[in-house]
Structure formats: structure tokens, C-alpha cells
Amino acid sequence: MQKIVDFIKQTFNTQEFIPLHEPRFIGNEKQYLNDCIDSNFVSSVGKYVDSFEKEFASKVGSKYAIATVNGTAALHIALILAGVKKDDEVITQPLTFIATCNAISYIDAKPIFVDVNLDTMGMSPSSLLSFLEANCEIKDKKCINKTTGKNIKACVPMHTFGHSCRIDKIKEICDTWCIALVEDAAESLGSYYKNKHTGTFGKVGAFSFNGNKIITSGGGGVIVTDDEDLAKRAKHLTTTAKIPHQFEYVHDEIGYNYRLPNLNAALLVAQLEQLDTFLVSKRTLASIYKEFFSHEEINFVTEPKESKSNYWLQAIILSDVKQRNEFLEFTNKNGVMTRPIWKLMNELEMFKECQSTTLENAKYLEERVVNIPSSVIL
Ligand SMILES: *Cc1c(COP(=O)(O)O)cnc(C)c1O
């Protein structure tokens, strides 16, 4: 294991502590921030919010993008746009960051967990389909869960660590079963499946710009959609549902203060300009790791077939829990930050009672996957 620690230190060219993922502000960040401060438009209106939304939409090939204060807020609104209401059910994967399930819970809807594929670490289309076939029926163009009598409104697959799941198959199944597809693309900016950007397959997609993501504004998020009405509604809901007026405050429903401040948008415009450079660096790091770990007989996670990954967080799969724990202890003790993949959502107190399929693959990965330092190398 010392050999691995040495190799990572050599790769990052330092003997100091190596974080899992640190941001890089090496473009126009300071210039745009200064400009923003000089203009006095630091808050919820300003030219950087508008230009970020425009540039982001064009980058991912979506018609509309609506900036939000963080990725969880983006997901929350995305689910509302998909029609999810109190007591509805939403299918997702157990192997994800808590934000996915939190957003579902904010609406008082319930998650249902289906298994993941081993190669993508994202939702398995066959697990999704067999769950639907065994438990659901379509009535009046609604997907009804026969066990609970509830309406399954949406399905939220997630592109784990920037590796695309089999999103075209998942979309096909969702269409057949009258379920809205909402993509949690928080980790996959710069990742493509069959040459189409992740987050743009479903009705709505959500991205995050938290401090550890591939580009960051400290905190931030964005909703993408091709539907003009949904885009308008997303803007309305995220901006307190205020009806535009020269001076009056009239709000026509309960809205949210989910606006991204112009200051953060200024940072994001600068970060987005560097995305392509960051992607090259991350893919290079992946090939360096792949080569190294192939000699160590450790399984390094590479992009699934027919996709192009952003390699946001680099990952290895160890042979069992024991080896994983030893690896985590040794590396973290020796100045190399590593982290296990998330504890499965269905194992958390809040989601223990939720319906699920057998989750063999998710469990297998939970016990073995570890993220290793992944920052952009300058
Ligand atoms: C980062 C992340 C989010 C959103 O997180 P925020 O911190 O609210 O921006 C959502 N889902 C997944 C899978 C994530 O990794």
C-alpha cells in the first residue's frame, strides 16, 4: 500500500496532504468577481446569471437552463416540474448521494430503490423493468404500484462519479410505463452517453456546482429542460413565484428562494470557460491511474461502453470490505485522502421502510468502491 501512496504523491507532485478533490480557480474568476462587485449587482439579478444560463444550456445541448442556489434545490424543483406530489412514489437507485433522496422527501414523496449495474454504478434498466413488471400496472396513463396503491410519478437515475448509466434504455422503459424521467446529473457535467450530454435525456435534469464538483461556484446548481413551459415554471418557482411587475409584490403560489446569486454566477461563467481543459486533465489522470492499477491487480473504474466520462471522481474496486477498510485507513493516515462510496440509501434510518428490489450489485459496490485523489492536475 505504501507503493500506492508513493505513486499518488508522485502523480500530484507533492509530499503534502492530497485532498480528494479541490477546486481550481485559474481562469477569469477574479476578474468577473471584481466586475460583479463593481457593478453592485451581487445578488439575485445580474448579467452573469443570464449569461451563465445561456452558456450552460449551449454547452450541454439543452434548450433552457435555470440557475439555482445548489444542486439539491435544482433536483427539488426538477421533481416538482415532473409532476411529483405528496404521497407519490419516485424510483431511484440506492447507491447515490443523500441529496437525491432528500429532494424526493421534501415533496413528501417516497423513494423506491432498484439495483444498479456493476459497470456503470448507475441504475440498472433490467432491475427497473423487472420491478415494474412484477409490481405495477398502467391505469389511465398512470403507473400504479399495486403493492401500495400509489402513483409512481418519476424515475431518477444518477450518473455515478460522472460515468453514464444506460440512460437510453431507462428512458425507453419510463416512456412505456408513463413515468417522467428526471436525471440527477449532479456529478456528470462533461459526460456523454452515445454522444448526447447526460442530463438531457429526460424531461428535466439537474446539475450541481458544489465545492467538490468538476466546476464550482462554492455552491450552485442548474435545471435543464427542452420544454419552454417547464423552463418558465422553473424560473418562476425558484424566484419566489413573483409575478413580474414594476413595483408590486404579487406572488401566485408558494415559491422558493432558490436563486443563484450573481456573484456565484460570475464564478461559474469563469469555471465553465475552463471545463474542456479540466476534462482533458481528468481523463489523463484516469489513464495514468488505469495503467498503474493494472500492475497492482486492483480494479480501476473506467468509462462504460458507448459513453464518455468526465472522470469527476476516480474510483477503484477493492476485493472485499476488509481490504477496503485497510486501504482507507492506510491512505488517510499517510496524507492521501480517500473515501468510501456512500452507504446505501435503503440502509439509512429514514429510508429503511422503502420498497426495493434485491440490491446485490449496489451492496457489492458499497463494500468495495473507494474514491482516490481526483483534482485537476495543473
Ligand atoms: C452533489 C450532488 C447533488 C447536489 O448537491 P448540492 O450540494 O446540493 O449541490 C445531488 N446529487 C448527487 C448525486 C450529488 O453528487
Image (cartoon, rainbow, N blue to C red):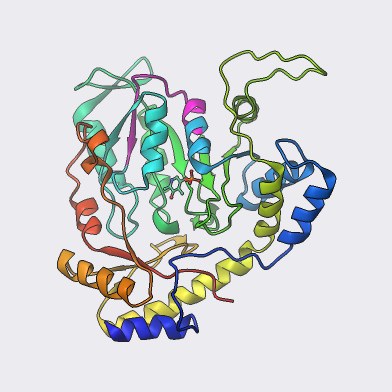
The image quarter containing residue 132 is top left
Q: Can residue 201 be seen in this view?
A: no
Residue beneath the point at 71% across and 65% down? 27
In the drawing, does residue 284 fall left or right of residue 44? left
Task: Find residue 358 and report its horizontal and vertical position in percent.
Answer: 17, 43
Percent of width and height locating residue 201: 50, 43
**Is-magenta flag for residue 354?**
no
Could you tell me which quadrant the N terminus lies in? bottom left
The residue that appears at 54% across and 52% down in the rendered structure is 197
In the rendered image, residue 17, in percent from the top left (x then y), is placed at: 44, 75
Residue 94: quadrant of the picture: top left
Residue located 35% across and 25% down the image: 109
Above-or-below relation of 323 to 128: below
Dividing the picture into quarters, in which one does residue 137 lie?
Answer: top left
Question: What segment carries the magenta color?
Answer: 78-92
The quarter of the image holding the C terminus is: bottom right
